[in-house]
């Protein structure tokens, strides 16, 4: 069985008196593609912020690569593409190359200038997401699908072992969405990158990811995508409190 890269053990979190996460436990293994699904307000983004250390851990424990989160040094091993990546200021005066280069700050530090090796990594990351030739293009001039790829390249440039994406396909067209999932699969196969993908689109995620975690404050399911599909009506009734109709995409 493959190595555990992330261990979330009995994690709970509150905003004031509001219980957002209720004793959540799951693991992510090396090379696993995990889809995290659930309704709006179910705690998905809060869980991501907890496991990334962006919110203080209130209850339970979180460890990465066998190391407690608060002691983890090489955080560049975890790449993160937030929801805000899809709604950034399109007038921001930065080129594709400059945005991707920002992804090396964790490795370089704030004051070390990038050298030839770092610039080559940027070039490789841009090529990896299919944007060669657009290095000097202003990011605000790109399509939504291209912008999404830039932010994935920024996350990839530090050569992470895990890639976490929060609602990454919001605002992109069907073709870009298909190309996005093809890119994730190739990264997983070729680089053995572990993935956590947060989405409300269960119909797509359950077909594209290897395993599924269904969250609505509590974790109502965590297992193989095939088992999720087989038990979907029961799981969704329990986690949503009512039946849910999954729309089938033509693509």
Image (cartoon, rainbow, N blue to C red):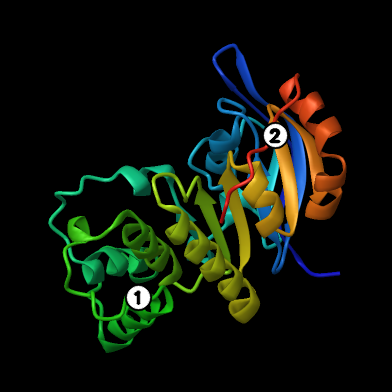
Dot 1: what SS?
A: helix
Q: How far across and how far down the image is residue 207, in percent?
A: 70, 55
Within 10 Å of disc 1 (Cα), the crowding (few <14, some 14-19, many 20+) is many
As drawn, the label of residue 215 is 2
Location of residue 94 in the rendering, given as x and y in whole percent from the top left corner: 17, 61
Horizontal relation, residue 37 to residue 228: left or right: left
Q: How crowded is the residue under tag 2: few (<14 C-alpha within 10 Å), some, or many (20+)?
A: many
Q: Quadrant of the N terminus?
A: bottom right
Residue 111 seen from this side? no
Q: Position of residue 233 (x, y in %)?
A: 82, 33
Q: Is residue 218 above or below residue 67?
A: above
Q: Is residue 193 above or below residue 16?
A: below
Res. 106 mark = none
Which residue shows up at 80% across the image and 25% down it?
237
* Quarter of the figure that contains the C terminus: bottom right
| Camera-nearest residue between 171 and 32 | 171
Using the rendered image of the protein, determine whether residue 239 is visible from the camera's viewpoint.
Answer: yes
Residue 126, disc: 1
> What's the distance in space between the residues labelled 2 and 1, CA to CA?
33 Å
């Amino acid at each position: 069985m493959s190595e555990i890269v992330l261990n979330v053990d009995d994690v709970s979190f509150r905003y004031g008196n509001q219980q957002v996460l209720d004793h959540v436990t799951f693991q992510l293994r090396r090379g696993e593609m995990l889809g995290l699904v659930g309704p709006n307000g179910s705690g998905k983004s809060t869980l991501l912020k907890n496991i990334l250390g962006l919110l203080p851990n209130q209850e339970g424990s979180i460890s990465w690569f066998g190391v407690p989160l608060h002691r983890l040094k090489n955080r560049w091993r975890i790449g993160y593409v937030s929801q805000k990546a899809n709604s950034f200021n399109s007038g921001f005066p930065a080129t594709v190359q400059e945005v991707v280069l920002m992804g090396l700050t964790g490795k370089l530090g704030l004051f070390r200038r990038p050298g030839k090796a770092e610039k080559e990594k940027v070039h490789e990351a841009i090529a990896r997401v299919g944007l060669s030739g657009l290095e000097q293009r202003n990011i605000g001039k790109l399509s939504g699908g291209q912008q999404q790829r830039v932010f994935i390249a920024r996350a990839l440039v530090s050569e992470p072992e895990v890639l976490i994406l929060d609602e990454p396909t919001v605002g992109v067209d069907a073709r870009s969405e298909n190309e996005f999932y093809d890119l994730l699969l190739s990264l997983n196969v070729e680089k053995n990158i572990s993935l956590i993908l947060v989405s409300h689109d269960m119909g797509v995620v359950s077909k594209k990811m290897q395993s599924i975690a269904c969250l609505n404050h509590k974790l109502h399911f965590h297992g193989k995508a095939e088992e999720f599909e087989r038990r979907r009506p029961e799981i969704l009734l329990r986690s949503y409190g009512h039946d849910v109709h999954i729309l089938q995409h033509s693509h």
